[in-house]
Each structure stands twice: as structure tokens, then as C-alpha cells.
Amino acid sequence: MKLFAALAAVWMCSPAFAATEAYAEEASLPHAVAKGPEAPAPSTAPVGPSVALLTQRFTGATKDSDKTLALQQIAKTAPVSGQDISNLYDLFARFSDPYTRGAIMESLGRLGPGHPQLEPLFMTYLRQPEPDAQLFGVNGAFRLRARAALPLIREIAGRRFAARETTETNMGERNAWWTQYEALSVLAQWEGDKAYDLVSSKGLESAKVGAILGRYYWRQTLPRLKAWSASGELIATERAALAVSAQIDLADAKATRPGMIALLRDPKVDTEIRHNIALKVGLSSSDEEVEALVAEHDKTASPDEKLYWAAAIFVSRSQKAVPLLVRYARQTENETMRTGALAQLKDMLGDAEAQALIEPEKKK
């Protein structure tokens, strides 16, 4: 049964919340960057070799191990000079594999406001026609919070997507697609509500923008999930799926809890939407709220409907979930769920205490 599999996935699920404003984008970024832009942190001059020197070591290396070491050092080093930035971009333009570009973006991510001398460089990249240059410029300008770059980033973000999906494009169009996606993500983080109308309109053109809407505009997006998923339209249904699976801030989860509970109770809402909502509800619940979820579970008659509440309760890892975990470990006929419940009990309480809690049932 699909719902049993969904509940079993609770014991292997990823966190549904971002610990900070930093948001790890989907690993599906195929050739651009390993993860999306993060809020910049102040950078300091490197203690060891400069980025410029490390990039030269990478390009001059003949052994894979030396290249790997150079990339690891690049990722840990902040660029502080124009030469550092120039060398990073040269490497970015020459190598499109996610590992190399990920290291470059990690280095770039160590930039922060306070380097106005570097802003003209990123403005130059933004003005170039090549998508790779624009992508590099978008990320760098965001790290520096170069306000002069905002009009150029808005221009990139406001273009019409060449295709709904990156798989429908050739390599050049694909690069342009991801550059525009990154520009939208940057504007969502940088300008917040001011950029919402633009980001929302682009979600009509490409479903993948749903990930940005879910992550940065959860309060506006939640009330639209049911309609999107029930529309029967391919873009809208995929947009809903990506939005509901996005990481969100704990504060947004707390603020929208009544709306999420309403969707969780609604049997007309798509199964996958409700499962993801259950995870967000559970992970944002206090002990008192977990007790309320247990009450919802116990008063729900349908075994299938109970599973949504069980998913929320179990993922909370609250001590208030222990009695229900014991019930599932003792009584459920589904082997996967029974094993999962016991594994979570052992993880939370230790092997001996968990085994003691379920042992009395075995002796009867």
C-alpha cells in the first residue's frame, strides 16, 4: 500500500526545515552549481594560499588526487582580490561538472558585503551575453549585496523561460534556464515580498519555480497547494509537489500550522501533498502539539487516514510519541512499519529500554 510506504519513509526522511536562511537547492542542478545561493557571511583574508594560486594549482595538476586537493582548498578559501575572482570565473567557464563548480561556488559563498572594489567585476559578468557569465555574476553580486546589480538580475529573472523543463532544451538553453532560475532564487532571498509577484508569475511558466515559492514564500503558497494539485494541469501539479517538498523556516511552519492541519484533515487533498504536510507539522510540533496529534490519530476511524497523523507524530521525535510508537511496534501487521517503529524507539531510548517496552506484549 502506498501509504504504508509513505509512512515507512518517515524513518529515512530528510529535514523539512532550513536551519538558517541558507537553503540547499535540489541536487538536480545538473551542471551549474551544487546548491543555491545562501545569505552571505563576512569574509576575511585567507591565511594560506590565495584563490588565484589554488586555481593555478588545479589547472596545472596532472594527478586526480592533486586536482581534488586543490578543489577542496578552493572551496575553503574566500576570494579577496580581483585576480581571485577572475581565476574563479575562468575555472567556472572551463569546467561544467558539478564537483568543480560546487567548489567554486563554495569559495564564492565566502564573500560578503564589505568588498565594494569587487562589485564592478560582477557587474561586468552580468552584462555578458553568455549564461555562464551571468550565472557567476548573479551569485557574486548577491554575496556582496551589490545593489547596483539588482536591475540586471531582475532583467535576467524576468525573461520568459525558453522551456518548461531543462530536459526540453539544448545545452545553451539549459544554461540560460538555470541562470534565470538562480536569478529568481536570489531575488526571493534578497528582496523578499517585493519579488513575490515576479517569482509567482514565473511559476506559471515552469513548475520548478515551485521549489522557490515553497521555500521563500510558504505563507503565500500553502493556501494554493490544494488548487494546484487538483487542477489536472501538468505544470500546476508539479509546482505543488515541488513547493510542498521544499525546506521551510520553522517560523513559517509555526505561523501556518492551522492551514497545514486543515490540509492534513482533508481527504480530497493529494496523498503526496498531505504526506509532506504531515512531515512539516510533525517537525514543527511542541510536546503539547504532539499530544494533540496523537488525539487526532486515535479518533480517526480510517486506517489509511491514521497514517498521516502517525507520520507527523513519529517524525517529531517527541517523547510524547513513544506510546504510539510502542503500539505500532507491538501491534501493526505491516512488517516494515513494525520494524521502523522499533528502530526509532531504540534510537530515541536505547536498545534495552525500547525492548523492555515492547517485551510484555510478546510474553502474552
Image (cartoon, grey):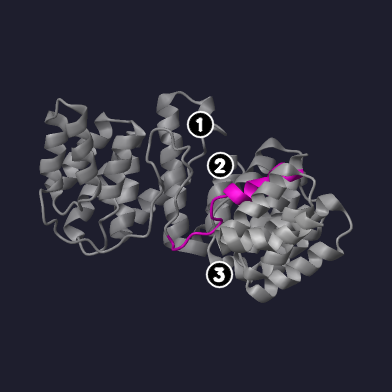
Q: Nearer the viewer, mark 3 or mark 1?
A: 3
* Residue 303 pos. (x, y %): 84, 52
Specify the amino acid type for callout 1. Answer: Thr
According to the picture, the residue beneath numbered tag 2 turns out to be 208
Of labels 1 and 2, earlier in sequence is 1
Specify the amino acid type for callout 2. Answer: Lys
* Position of residue 132 in the picture relative to residue 242 (left or right): left
* Residue 92 pos. (x, y %): 27, 36
Instruction: State the separation of the CA atoms marked 2 and 3.
Output: 24 Å
Instruction: State the separation of the CA atoms marked 3 and 1.
Output: 32 Å
Residue at the extreme right of the image, as rendered: 301
* Residue 295 pos. (x, y %): 79, 69
Q: Nearer the viewer, residue 150 or 165?
A: 165
Instruction: State the separation of the CA atoms marked 1 and 2.
Output: 9 Å
According to the picture, the residue beneath numbered tag 1 turns out to be 166
Q: In this orientation, does residue 280 appear?
A: no
Does residue 270 sit above or below 100 in this rendering?
below
* Position of residue 137 in the picture relative to residue 226 (left or right): left
- At x 44%, y 29%, the residue is 173
* Residue 114 pos. (x, y %): 21, 64
Asked whether 5 falls inside the magenta stretch, the response is: yes
Specify the amino acid type for callout 3. Answer: Ala
Of labels 2 and 3, earlier in sequence is 2
Name the disc covering residue 251, or none: 3
Q: Quick check: marks 1 and 2 in contact, CB under 8 Å?
A: yes
Residue numbers of the magenta segment: 3-21
Residue at the extreme front of the image, as rendered: 363
* Mark 3, secondary structure of its residue: helix
Q: Nearer the viewer, residue 146 or 34?
A: 34
